[in-house]
Image (cartoon, rainbow, N blue to C red):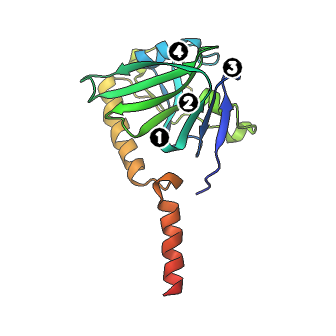
């Protein structure tokens, strides 16, 4: 796969976020209370939902002056925990670092990242709405919608695990390993 980084900047331009493969493992709109609270200062989503993508932590980088807060689902430290980072200046969410059951994964704000993709047709789009009953029900935006908390988790976890096990990201070494194996096969 192509290992080109894409970078977008927050509303004030002081913080940036980069992702190796825009969209990562899974792009989604999250309507959970934690995301809505964090995204209340996002100029595009205005706290109605969070437009995010989850990926390996080695595929997401953030820079600039950020402040952080910690959220955790039940049971604490084993549940879906995140260190959530936003710009100190404009308060726009930048990225989340996974902890607990999310250790090794990070989440990027796609509103910010999409600013770095000049071609509108190439910008990342959400694949699914999750935790929809938790939040403001503005519209489903033409993507599949998972309403309940249990339903969101029951569908998202297997989907994410499937993509994790099939990942061919540069940081996983799969692309390089496949290249090395084919080169070795030609030598032998």
Mark 2: which secondary structure? Answer: loop
Mark 4: which secondary structure? Answer: loop
Mark 3: which secondary structure? Answer: loop
Is tag 4's residue or tag 2's residue first in the polypeptide sequence?
4
- Image position, residue 171 (x, y; %): 50, 52
In the figure, 28 relative to 70: above or below?
Answer: below
The residue wearing badge 3 is 11
The residue wearing badge 2 is 142
Task: Please give left or right for residue 129 compared with residue 4 in the image.
Answer: left
Foreground mark, 4 or 2?
A: 4
- Image position, residue 16 (x, y; %): 64, 30
Q: Is residue 56 visible?
A: no
Foreground mark, 1 or 4?
A: 1
Q: Which mark is residue 57?
A: 1
Is tag 1's residue or tag 3's residue first in the polypeptide sequence?
3
Is tag 4's residue or tag 3's residue first in the polypeptide sequence?
3
Q: Which mark is residue 95?
A: none
**Disc 1 from disc 4: Cα separation:** 26 Å
Mark 4 residue crowding within 10 angstroms, few (<14) / some (14–19) / many (20+): many
The residue wearing badge 4 is 48
For the point 42% across and 55% down, which residue is it? 166
Foreground mark, 2 or 3?
A: 3
């Amino acid at each position: 796969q192509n290992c080109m980084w894409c970078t977008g900047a927050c509303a004030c331009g002081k913080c940036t976020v980069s992702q190796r493969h825009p969209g990562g493992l899974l792009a989604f709109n999250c309507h959970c209370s934690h995301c809505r609270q964090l995204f209340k200062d996002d100029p595009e989503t205005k706290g109605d939902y969070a437009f995010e993508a989850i990926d390996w932590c080695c595929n997401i980088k953030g820079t600039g002056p950020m402040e952080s807060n910690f959220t955790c689902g039940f049971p604490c430290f084993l549940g879906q925990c995140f260190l959530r980072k936003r710009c100190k200046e404009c308060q726009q969410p930048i990225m989340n670092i996974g902890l607990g059951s999310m250790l090794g994964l990070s989440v990027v704000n796609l509103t910010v990242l999409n600013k770095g993709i000049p071609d509108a047709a190439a910008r990342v789009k959400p694949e699914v709405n999750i935790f929809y009953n938790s939040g403001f029900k503005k519209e489903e935006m033409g993507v599949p919608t998972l309403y309940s908390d249990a339903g969101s988790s029951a569908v998202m976890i297997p989907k994410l695990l499937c993509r994790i096990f099939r990942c061919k990201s540069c940081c996983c070494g799969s692309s390089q390993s496949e290249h090395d194996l084919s080169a070795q096969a030609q030598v032998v």
